[in-house]
Amino acid sequence: MARNLAGELFKAGFNCAESILLAFRELLKLDFPPQTVRLATGLGGGLGYAGCMCGALTASALVLGALKGRTTAVESRDAAYELTRQFHDLFQEKHGNTCCRALNPHPFDSKEHLRNCLKITGGTAKLLMEFLQQKGLA
């Protein structure tokens, strides 16, 4: 279900990061307004077409933060850091890289790029949901 929803959002025109954030907002009933998707817009294209960290991965970190992040500086950040590192490592193990341009070497917004990004976005959503279920967070 996570894969399909994120994929549908991507096909509707949202970027990889926006698709992940919106899909998990809906699936997990996260308590933030839909306008929060703006926070994820610049993450697409590996940080605004820079081709660095995959937007689907960075948005996954936002989802993990929504679940285990802190709201004051005196709270521990350890749980969020640990979950995020674990998911990063899982993503890297599955894909062999975390860098957008290495995962998807096609020119940005080309047919090949969009097709590959759709696959990565859906796969990341599935991987994140399985990770959350394994951790008892979904």
Image: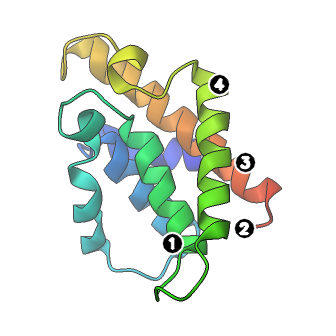
Identify residue for label 1: 66
Q: Which mark is residue 137?
A: 2
Residue at image position (29%, 17%) is 113
Residue at image position (54%, 76%) is 29
Residue 111 image position (x, y, % from top left): 24, 15
Structural distance between the alpha carbons of marks 1 and 4: 24 Å
- Tell which circle, 1 or 3, labels the residue nearer the N-terminal end: 1
- Tell which circle, 4 or 3, labels the residue nearer the N-terminal end: 4
Residue 32 image position (x, y, % from top left): 39, 80
- Tell which circle, 3 or 2, labels the residue nearer the N-terminal end: 3
Identify residue for label 4: 94
Secondary structure of the residue carrying tag 3 is helix
Question: Looking at numbered disc 1 in the image, what kind of residue is underneath it?
Answer: Ala
- Tell which circle, 1 or 4, labels the residue nearer the N-terminal end: 1
Question: Looking at numbered disc 2 in the image, what kind of residue is underneath it?
Answer: Leu
Identify residue for label 3: 130
Question: Looking at numbered disc 4 in the image, what kind of residue is underneath it?
Answer: Lys
Secondary structure of the residue carrying tag 4 is helix
Residue at image position (56%, 62%) is 64
Q: Tell whether label 3 touches label 1 (CB within 8 Å).
A: no
Question: Can you say whether 3 is above or below 118 in the image?
Answer: below
Q: Nearer the viewer, residue 112 or 57?
A: 57
Please say whether residue 1 is visible from this viewpoint. Answer: no
